[in-house]
Image (spheres, rainbow, N blue to C red):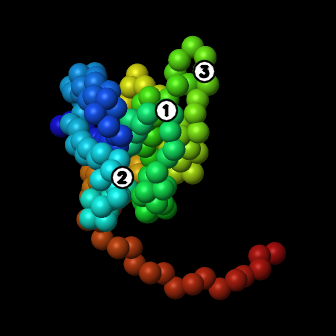
Amino acid sequence: MKANWSVVIVHEDVPTREEAVKFSDNLVRRFWAHYEFDFGWWPLGDLENETKSAEAAAKAVKADLLVFALNPEGRTPETLFGWVEDWIHARGDREGAVVGLLDPAAAPSGTTTERYLYLRSLAHRAGMDYLIQCPENMTQPIPDSLDSYAERARQRTTVLDEIMRRPAAPMLPPMKHRIFR
């Protein structure tokens, strides 16, 4: 059975959406043998609509990948900041990655812009990885993470079944303290 990965994509305009489509196609092509993908697409302007913004925030709380396809230059709309604040604390310690799809840091110059510095700080605040391209591999949850503990707690193994079927040991009366000489 394939694992399911939730991907939220926020894009700014038609050209950035086209870049996000290329990214998502590459993601599916690379990992389709092992993962199912649930994509959610939101134009940046939709985050101004209360209903659409709330829907996108609910998806972002559970997303494995948050992809931002934004033009590197320009003023970041206040609605983006507000939308991030709507979901960032609700994620808790959930693992995932923020993808700064058009981050100029990927270019040979290695410099970035304020918009993408904000996305890097967002990833840091959320305890998520920050990527600037399609990942080489998709890792499973870290073995000692809250996600992995929760997953293991939902599993019922043969060892657990055996323990659950075993009759309870009789309670012994407490021993009195004796001094041995």
User: In this rendering, would 21 be left or right of 116?
Assistant: left
Q: Are marks 2 and 3 in contact (CB under 8 Å)?
A: no
User: Marks 3 and 1: in contact by CB < 8 Å?
Assistant: no
Q: Distance between the residues labelled 2 and 1?
A: 22 Å
Could you say which quadrant of the image residue 24 lies in? Answer: top left
Q: Which of marks 2 and 3 is nearer the N terminus?
A: 2
- Where does label 2 land, which residue? 60
Residue 115 location in percent, x, y?
A: 53, 40
Q: Is mark 2 on a helix, strand or loop?
A: helix
Q: In this view, does 135 lie above or below 67?
A: above
Kind of residue at disc 2: Ala
Q: Given this view, does label 2 or label 3 mark the residue nearer the observer?
A: 3
Say what secondary structure mark 3 lies in: loop
Rendered position, 142 above or below 152: above
Q: Residue furthest left?
A: 1
Residue highlighted by disc 3: 110
Amino acid on which disc 1 is placed: Pro
- Residue 8 appears in which quarter of the rendering? top left
The answer to whether residue 47 is visible is yes
Q: Which of marks 2 and 1 is nearer the N terminus?
A: 2
The Cα–Cα distance between marks 2 and 3, rounded to whole angstroms, is: 28 Å
In this figure, which residue is indicated by the disc labeled 1? 72
Q: In which quarter of the image is the C terminus?
A: bottom right
Residue 120 visible in image: no
Residue 125 percent coordinates (x, y): 57, 51
Q: Where is residue 124 in the image (x, y as percent from the top left)?
A: 57, 45
Outermost residue, right direction?
Answer: 181
Amino acid type, callout 3:
Gly
The residue under the point 38% across, 35% down is 69
Residue drawn at x 65%, y 85% as measured from the top left: 176
**Can you say whether 117 is above or below 153 in the image?**
above
